[in-house]
Image (cartoon, rainbow, N blue to C red):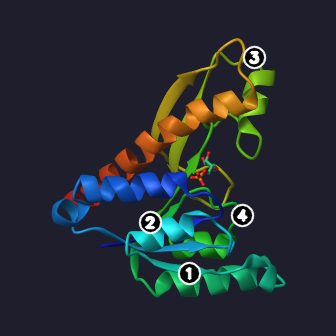
């Protein structure tokens, strides 16, 4: 089972997934491997890390396309080159067209740094602080056509502390993202295996 990970930036979630796949022997346990990491930005720091683990990398620069449909078609071509069983969005900061989402229905997952359905979209930590939330967190969910919606696969909660800024809260949430995302993907792989057994 090939897993393709899409990133736009630092790729710390991708790195956590790559390390978990090695540490927890996903190849032996699930027949799963990280086949490729694809970015819409050539400067994404995560690409070098992926390459250093022997993972294929590719860049599909969104600026080179004059519509979302054209970008998504090129992205789908790059993704499909690896015949993925699962496509993982990990800090991938482009909104995908309904056509792209439909193509990977049931095998496309995302991580979002809030307790969905609260705070879809951007600036989640600032919005949680401004709303006076006492807890914040992270959600792994299946991707549907509506942004940051879709069936929830896993969540983790962190406290919002009195002196938190968006940055301190983001760091606390991100450390939980790194634990939750690999665990949620392993759960998805196990589930997929048992359905096919
Ligand atoms: C994470 O907080 C993720 O939930 C959000 O963007 C951030 C990406 O971080 N969508 P990284 O690229 O995985 O380090």
Which residue matches tag 3?
A: 132
Mark 4 sits on what residue?
95
Measured in 3D between alpha carbons, the distance from the residue under mark 3 to the one under mark 2, in whole angstroms, is 35 Å
- For marks 4 and 1, the one nearer the N-term is 1
| Residue 105 visible at all | no
Up the image or down, 174 lies above or below 110; here it is above
Q: SS class of the residue under badge 4? A: loop
Helix, strand or loop status at disc 3:
loop
First along the sequence among labels 3 and 1: 1
Q: Which residue is mark 2?
A: 107
> Within 8 Å of ligand 1, the CB of disc 4?
no
Dot 3, how many residues are within 10 Å of its Cα: few (below 14), some (14-19), or many (20+)? Answer: few
Please identify, in this view, whether the residue under mark 3 or under mark 2 is nearer the observer. 3
| Residue 13 appears anywhere in the view | yes
Task: Say whether mark 2 is within 8 Å of ligand 1.
Answer: no
> Which quadrant is home to the C terminus?
bottom left
Q: Residues within 10 Å of mark 1 (few under 14, many from 20)?
A: some
Residue 121: x %, y % from top left: 74, 47
Name the residue that disc number 1 marks: 58
């Amino acid at each position: 089972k090939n897993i393709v990970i899409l990133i736009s930036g630092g790729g710390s979630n991708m790195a956590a997934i790559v390390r978990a796949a090695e540490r927890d022997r996903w190849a032996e346990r699930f027949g799963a491997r990280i086949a490729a990491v694809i970015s819409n930005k050539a400067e994404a720091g995560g690409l070098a890390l992926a390459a250093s683990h022997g993972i294929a990398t590719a860049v599909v620069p969104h600026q080179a396309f004059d519509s979302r449909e054209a970008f998504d078609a090129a992205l789908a071509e790059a993704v499909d080159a690896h015949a993925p069983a699962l496509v993982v969005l990990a800090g991938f900061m482009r909104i995908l067209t309904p056509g792209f989402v439909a193509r990977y229905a049931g095998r496309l997952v995302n991580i979002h740094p809030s307790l969905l359905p609260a705070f879809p979209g951007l600036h989640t930590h600032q919005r949680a602080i401004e709303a006076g939330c006492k807890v914040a967190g992270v959600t792994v969910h299946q991707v549907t056509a509506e942004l940051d919606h879709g069936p929830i696969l896993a969540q983790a909660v962190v406290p919002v502390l009195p002196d938190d800024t968006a940055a301190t809260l983001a760091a606390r949430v991100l450390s939980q993202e790194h634990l939750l995302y690999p665990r949620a993907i392993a759960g998805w792989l196990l589930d997929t295996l048992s359905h096919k057994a």
